[in-house]
Image: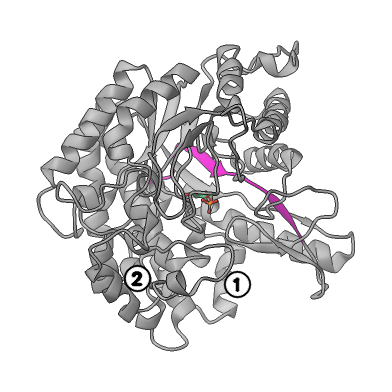
């Protein structure tokens, strides 16, 4: 087959953001508190002022709920996208975006999650946002749940541990489909559904202290099961309500290599990768994998299911698979092996890879391997809905940001994507994380910058919040304009 330099016709180039990391406006127009609104800034070095406000237990949560300020909670500020979205969308359109992935803040639509009627101000905001995207020719991809469930559901029900939360989510999703289905064809149910094991509170509102001692892990699996069922139920509703809709699952692709070819390293690695695939197995294939069921049984974990649950999962699988990819890591049987942080994980350091300012190992080829591996396993269209590099950007003496390192990162990843496509992978879109600087999910830092667009704000919320193009802005614009061909002319 003759290969062209271009990506497939109609390839969806764009960027991805999440409501809780950009919108701000945490306490206006009827919005309720979300779990993200009590997430504190985590500076690189320990800082007693901030550490005193980390809400990991019921007492801390109560204190955060009573705090009327945004001092300790950067996600309350975001980047003021709520008021500046027109300016931001105009810049995305200038870069040539075909698509933008956003999320809808559940607590802006249902402030506590339990209301019978949606908050009209919240609905109005998203209507305006989608209308503006439509005017600019930007196709929305919408995540229904991206680390921002109503805090009230977390406190009252221990989040997704309680089956009742499925009903509230289904109500929320259906309001979104009814209101916004006219603009939105691509929907994702849960962002990084697998992350529930790494941060149960952020992902599913699960408060460890509320579990019976010794049953914490059991509760996390139960909450996960409820999310799987909810995802399947709303997939069904979307299929019935929205013509030509595409509903996707979203996985954190945590590519893991054996540190050596010692069989012990290989087996440990294989098991890590099997565990990482489990979530997409349920959502794409519609059933719990036998190996995972056996693993749970061996661990004494029992998931309570309603008689119809397995049928619901089987009948309502997703139409496409999406994932985030930032880094890879290694695995080793040697407990002394050096470790390095990745996306909410600590992996074994791979001696062949460089790393970012935050220690995440940069591995473009790992993206190609992931694409081939996932496509071979699932055989459905795929999108990369997060990929990017958090870095400490500095403004040079000429007043500009020369972020060559970011361009290098993207260039290398895009080339690997093209190779995977040429080898037969059905990749239909790519949204970078994040096209504009925003508040970090993991650390709530502003100084961990991902954007093609700089936002003048620091970790403590000082700054004008003005936007400024970085060098990577023009570069990405050229890539989109040429549908990837410019990658090979540089
Ligand atoms: C992904 C999340 O896991 O990683 C995003 O879906 C997040 O919300 C991104 O921002 C990067 O992580 P961080 O901690 O650098 O913001």
**Can you see residue 163?**
no
Q: Position of residue 476 (x, y in %)?
A: 58, 23
Q: Position of residue 321 (x, y in %)?
A: 52, 40
User: Is residue 135 covered in magenta?
Assistant: no
* Quadrant into which the N terminus falls: top right
Please, what secondary structure does the residue beneath circle 2 have? helix
Residue visible at 89% across and 64% down in the picture: 262
Which residue matches tag 2? 161
Check the image and tell me how it is coloured: one colour
Above or below, 198 against 85 in this view is below
Stretch in magenta: 316-330
Side (left or right) of 469 relative to 134? right
Q: Residue furthest front?
A: 397
Residue in front for this viewpoint, 201 or 437: 437
* Picture disc at residue 295: 1
**Can you see residue 206?**
yes
Above or below, 168 against 384 in this view is below
Residue visible at 68% across and 26% down in the picture: 424
Residue visible at 71% across and 36% down in the picture: 368
């Amino acid at each position: 087959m003759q290969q062209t330099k271009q990506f497939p016709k109609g390839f969806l180039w764009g960027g991805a953001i999440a409501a809780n990391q950009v919108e701000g406006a945490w306490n206006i127009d009827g919005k309720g508190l979300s779990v993200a609104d009590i997430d504190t800034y985590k500076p690189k070095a320990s800082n007693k002022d901030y550490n005193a406000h980390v809400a990991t237990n019921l007492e801390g949560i109560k204190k955060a709920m009573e705090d009327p300020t945004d001092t300790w909670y950067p996600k309350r500020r975001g980047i003021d996208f709520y008021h500046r979205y027109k300016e931001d969308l105009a810049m995305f359109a200038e870069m040539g975006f075909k698509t933008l992935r956003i999320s809808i803040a559940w607590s802006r639509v249902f402030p506590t999650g339990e209301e019978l009627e949606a908050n009209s101000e919240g609905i109005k905001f998203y209507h305006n946002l989608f209308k503006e995207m439509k005017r600019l020719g930007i196709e929305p991809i919408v995540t229904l749940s991206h680390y921002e469930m109503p805090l009230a559901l977390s406190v009252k029900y221990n989040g997704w541990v309680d089956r009742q939360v499925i009903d509230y989510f289904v109500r929320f999703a259906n309001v979104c489909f009814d209101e916004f289905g006219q603009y939105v064809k691509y929907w994702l149910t849960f962002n990084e559904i697998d992350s529930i094991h790494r941060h149960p509170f952020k992902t599913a509102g699960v408060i460890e202290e509320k579990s019976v001692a010794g049953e914490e892990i059991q509760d996390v699996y139960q909450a996960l099961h409820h999310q799987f069922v909810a995802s399947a139920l709303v997939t069904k509703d979307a299929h019935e309500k929205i013509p030509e809709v595409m509903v996707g699952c979203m996985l954190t692709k945590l590519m893991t290599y054996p540190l050596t070819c010692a069989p012990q390293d290989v087996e440990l690695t294989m098991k890590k990768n099997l565990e990482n695939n489990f979530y997409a197995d349920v959502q794409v294939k519609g059933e719990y994998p036998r190996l995972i069921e056996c693993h749970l049984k061996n661990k004494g974990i029992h998931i309570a299911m309603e008689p119809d649950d397995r049928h619901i999962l089987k009948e309502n699988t997703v139409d496409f698979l999406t994932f985030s990819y930032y880094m890879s890591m290694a695995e080793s049987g040697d407990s002394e092996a050096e470790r390095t942080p990745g996306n909410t994980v600590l992996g074994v350091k791979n001696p062949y890879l460089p790393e970012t300012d935050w220690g995440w190992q940069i591995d473009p080829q790992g993206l190609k391997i992931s694409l081939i591996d996932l496509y071979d396993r699932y055989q459905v269209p795929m999108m990369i809905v997060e990929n990017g590099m958090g870095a400490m950007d500095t403004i040079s003496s000429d007043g500009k940001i020369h972020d060559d390192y970011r361009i290098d990162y993207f260039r290398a990843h895009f080339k690997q994507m093209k190779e995977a496509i040429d080898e037969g992978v059905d990749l239909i879109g790519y949204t970078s994380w994040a096209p504009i600087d925003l508040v970090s999910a993991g650390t709530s830092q502003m100084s961990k910058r991902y954007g093609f667009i700089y936002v003048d704000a620091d970790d403590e919320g000082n700054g004008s919040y003005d936007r400024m193009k970085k060098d990577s802005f023009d570069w990405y614009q050229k890539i989109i304009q040429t549908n990837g061909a410019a990658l090979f002319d540089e």
